[in-house]
Structure formats: C-alpha cells, structure tokens
Image (spheres, rainbow, N blue to C red):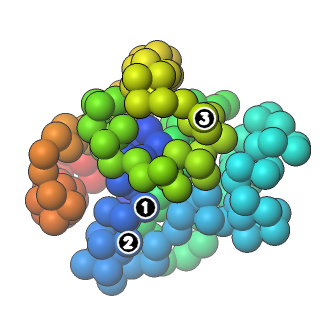
Amino acid sequence: MKRLFLVGYMGCGKSTLGRKLARRLGAAFIDTDARVEEHEGATVADVFRYEGETRFREIERDVLEEAIREGGDAVISTGGGLPTWSDNMECMNRAGLTVYLRRTPEQIARRLSPYGRQKRPRLRGLNDEELVAFMTRDMAAREPFYAKAALTIECGAMSDDEIADLILNALHEPSLQ
C-alpha cells in the first residue's frame, strides 16, 4: 500500500476511520481539511467564506498533490467536495486505492453534532428536516464522482472497526492492487 484515499460526504466518518486505519497499517494519516487549515492559517469555513469556493478548491488540490508527492504509506481523508472538483478523483485513482464510505443523508444527519453542523459552512442554520433535504440533493450531485472509487462500502450500521476490517481485507485483493 502506498496511498489509501477515503472519499465520501461530509460527516460520513472519513477522518475518524482514517486515523484508525493509519494506526493499524503503521502509515501516516493526512486529513486534507486539516492541511488546508495549516497552510492558510484559517478554518475551512473561513477560507470558504472569505476567499470563495473556487480558491478553496484550488488550495485543496495543492494539498492533495502535496500528499501524493510525500513518500511512504499514507491514509488520506479527503474533504467531501474534493473528489468533485477538476480531475481530483482520477488523480487519486491513479495514485492509490480510493474507498467511498457511503452513508444515507439520515445516517449522516444523526452523526453530526451541533458543532459539526456549525463548522461546515454549507450546513449552518439548517434544521433537521432542511439538513436531510439539502444533503439528499447535494449527495445526488456528488454520487457520480464518489462512484468512481475503486471500492465502495455501504457503511450502514457497521462499526468503524468493521469498516476498517473490510478495507484492510480489500487491500489484499489482487483486483484492487
């Protein structure tokens, strides 16, 4: 394994699962959102708000390219919109194994704390019903990009450990190498 990219909608568990996988694999963990914040000295929400989505996506692409260039094995948790911009999904598929963590809007809504909603610019101020409706529309638009992942996992009610086990087992599949 060189690069393992976790893709999926915001709040689906990419960062939490990525840390666990990196520990189990003895690999580095890279969170593209955290890297954007390090590089910019501002939160993702502030970069989005003050510099706009296009600039945010450009910075995000730079961070992705940096993560790919770094040596050694790594588990890379991507921002929810990263696969939808430019040729990012194709770039990740060329550079390593992409895994789509699929959850329903209702599952993600239950996972998001009030803080989790506040820190995501596109979710601020939405009540539960509006949140699910927004995510349903937004996820449908993103699905064609996420579906390009080499491996899709229907997370459903599985625990993080069960999902991690599935991914670790898939790493040994010749068809995914």
Q: Amino acid at mark 1?
A: Ser
Element at label 3: loop
Q: Neighbour class for label 1 at 10 Å: few (<14), some, many (≥20)?
A: many
Element at label 2: helix
Relative to 140, is 43 on the left or the right?
A: right
Residue 125, labelled with which disc?
A: 3
Q: Amino acid at mark 2?
A: Arg
Residue at x-position 21% and y-position 61%: 160
Q: Is the residue under label 3 in contact with that under label 2 (CB below 8 Å)?
A: no
122 or 74: nearer the viewer: 122
Residue 2, placed above or below residue 28: above
28 or 115: nearer the viewer: 115
Residue tagged by mark 2? 19
Could you tell me how far apart the alpha carbons at marks 2 and 3 are, in whole angstroms?
29 Å
Residue tagged by mark 1? 15
Front label number (1 vs 3): 3
Q: Position of residue 157 (x, y in %)?
A: 13, 45
| Residue 91 in view of the camera | no
Residue 41, placed above or below residue 11: below
Residue at x-position 35% and y-position 54%: 13
Which quarter of the rendered picture does the N terminus lie within? bottom left
Residue at x-position 81% and y-position 68%: 41
Could you tell me how far apart the alpha carbons at marks 1 and 2 are, in whole angstroms?
6 Å
Q: Amino acid at mark 3?
A: Gly
Residue at x-position 27% and y-position 53%: 177
Q: Position of residue 31 (x, y in %)?
A: 54, 64
Q: Is the residue under label 2 in contact with that under label 1 (CB below 8 Å)?
A: yes
**Of callouts 1 and 3, which one flags the residue occurring earlier in the amino acid sequence?**
1
**Of callouts 2 and 3, which one flags the residue occurring earlier in the amino acid sequence?**
2
Residue 127, labelled with which disc?
A: none
Picture mark count: 3
